[in-house]
């Protein structure tokens, strides 16, 4: 237990440091989060922070979002445009930054394939089955177009009946869609922004469990030694 707790603490420290430093975000996004001289109206944080995703689905969420995972979440694009127009000079420096607002995103296309076609489920439903999302509308509109299927061949069989905008993903990361074609290959060993936060939440939970277990074991040993001393 103690060795596991130490390893867990070290991993927790590394992930916490990466998340706190907003590692992986564009410099422009980090600048707006940390020291913007003109606060962005309705800024809620990073998109990765807004998605509370179980570890087992986090890598597929990163794949589905792509570069969008590096975006910032705002409450209104109209307010953002007004802010950009009203701030003297250039309010964003250090490159480009993307913004998303749940209200501006479309609802996912109507598509309910039969389970017998090898469909595991729609990604937004899979991630919210085990974790409460920070913003249910945002999760649905971002991930509701993504369906997880058991194999690439089954994805290919589903593609002709899928509406425009639907993305079919396999558990190992093959991606198929009418718009972008086929993408295959090994998934990167580097954690994506969503995966990093999901693992940190799981590590925090595991570390708390191990810390409690170590404390209880230590107390039991101390009590046993005290009893032996009284004999």
Image (spheres, rainbow, N blue to C red):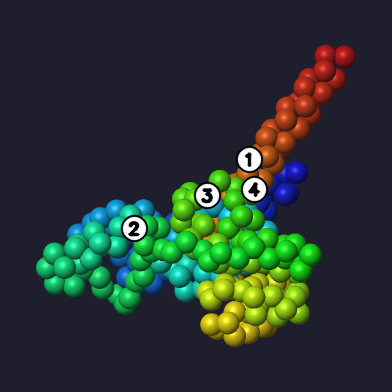
- Residue carrying label 1: 208
Mark 3, residues whose alpha carbon is within 10 Å: few (<14), some, or many (≥20)? some
Left or right relative to 19: residue 229: right
Closer to us: 176 or 205: 176
Of marks 2 and 1, the one in the foreground: 2
Which residue matches tag 3? 133
Mark 4 sits on what residue? 130
Count of numbered labels shown in the rendering = 4
Q: Residue at x 52, y 57 (%)?
A: 140
Dot 1 crowding, Cα within 10 Å, few <14, some 14–19, many 20+: some
Q: Is residue 119 above or below residue 198?
A: below
Q: Earlier in the sequence, mark 4 or mark 2?
A: 2
SS at mark 1? Answer: helix
Measure the C-alpha gap from mark 4 to mark 2: 25 Å
Residue nearer the viewer, 230 or 113: 113
Q: Residue 146 is drawn in which quadrant?
A: bottom right
């Amino acid at each position: 237990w103690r060795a596991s707790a130490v390893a867990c603490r070290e991993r927790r420290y590394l992930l916490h440091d990466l998340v706190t430093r907003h590692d992986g975000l564009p410099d422009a996004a980090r600048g707006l989060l940390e020291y913007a001289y003109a606060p962005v109206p309705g800024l809620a944080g990073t998109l990765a922070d807004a998605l509370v995703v179980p570890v087992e689905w986090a890598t597929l969420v990163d794949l589905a979002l792509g570069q969008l995972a590096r975006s910032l979440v705002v409450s209104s694009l109209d307010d953002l445009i007004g802010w950009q127009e009203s701030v003297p000079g250039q309010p964003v420096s250090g490159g480009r930054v993307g913004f998303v607002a749940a209200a501006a995103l479309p609802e996912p296309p109507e598509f309910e394939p039969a389970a017998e076609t090898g469909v595991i489920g729609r990604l937004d439903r899979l991630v919210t089955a085990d974790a409460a999302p920070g913003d249910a509308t945002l999760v649905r509109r971002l991930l509701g177009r993504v369906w997880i299927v058991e194999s690439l061949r089954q994805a290919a069989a589903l593609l002709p009946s899928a509406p425009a905008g639907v993305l079919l993903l396999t558990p190992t990361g093959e991606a198929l869609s009418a718009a972008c074609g086929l993408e295959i290959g090994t998934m990167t060993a580097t954690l994506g922004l969503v995966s990093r936060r999901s693992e940190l939440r799981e590590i925090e939970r595991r570390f708390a469990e191990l810390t409690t277990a170590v404390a209880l074991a230590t107390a039991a040993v101390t009590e046993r030694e005290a009893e032996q001393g009284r004999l």
